[in-house]
Amino acid sequence: MGIGIPYHQLKEIINGLRKTVNPMEANEDKHRIAKRLADAGQSGSLEVVFSHNYFTGAYGTPEQLAHRKKE
């Protein structure tokens, strides 16, 4: 599948993709990402937070978060 991205939007798209690492990736993948960043000398460019993602319940919908605050 091929897609086209206007060059002037590339930086925003890359930044958006980088922001998906913590909420979407499992620890196994986060370790691999952190290692590749370190190997490239870019460790400080992205904070990788382990054991927190959507499917482990660390994040939630606004309704879920509001309910947690009430408890």
Image (tube, grey):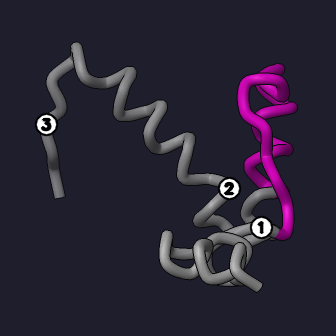
Residues in magenta? 31-51
Split into 4 quadrants, where in the image is the C terminus? bottom right
Q: How many residues crowd mark 2 within 10 Å: few (<14), some (14–19), many (20+)? A: some
Residue that extends furthest to the top in the rendered view of this protein: 8
Mark 3 element type: loop
Q: Residue at x 73, y 64 (%)?
A: 29
Identify residue type, mark 3.
Answer: Gly
Mark 1 element type: loop
Give the foreground label among 2 and 3: 2
Question: Label 1, on which residue?
Answer: 52
In the image, residue 29 sits, relative to residue 66, either above or below, namely above
| Nearer to me, 15 or 32 | 15
The answer to which image quadrant residue 55 occupies is bottom right
**Cβ–Cβ below 8 Å for labels 2 and 1?**
yes
In the image, residue 52 sits, relative to residue 45, either above or below, namely below
* Image spot of residue 14 (x, y percent): 43, 32
* Image spot of residue 40 (x, y percent): 77, 25
Question: Label 3, on which residue?
Answer: 4
Identify residue type, mark 2.
Answer: Asn
* Image spot of residue 33 (x, y percent): 74, 49
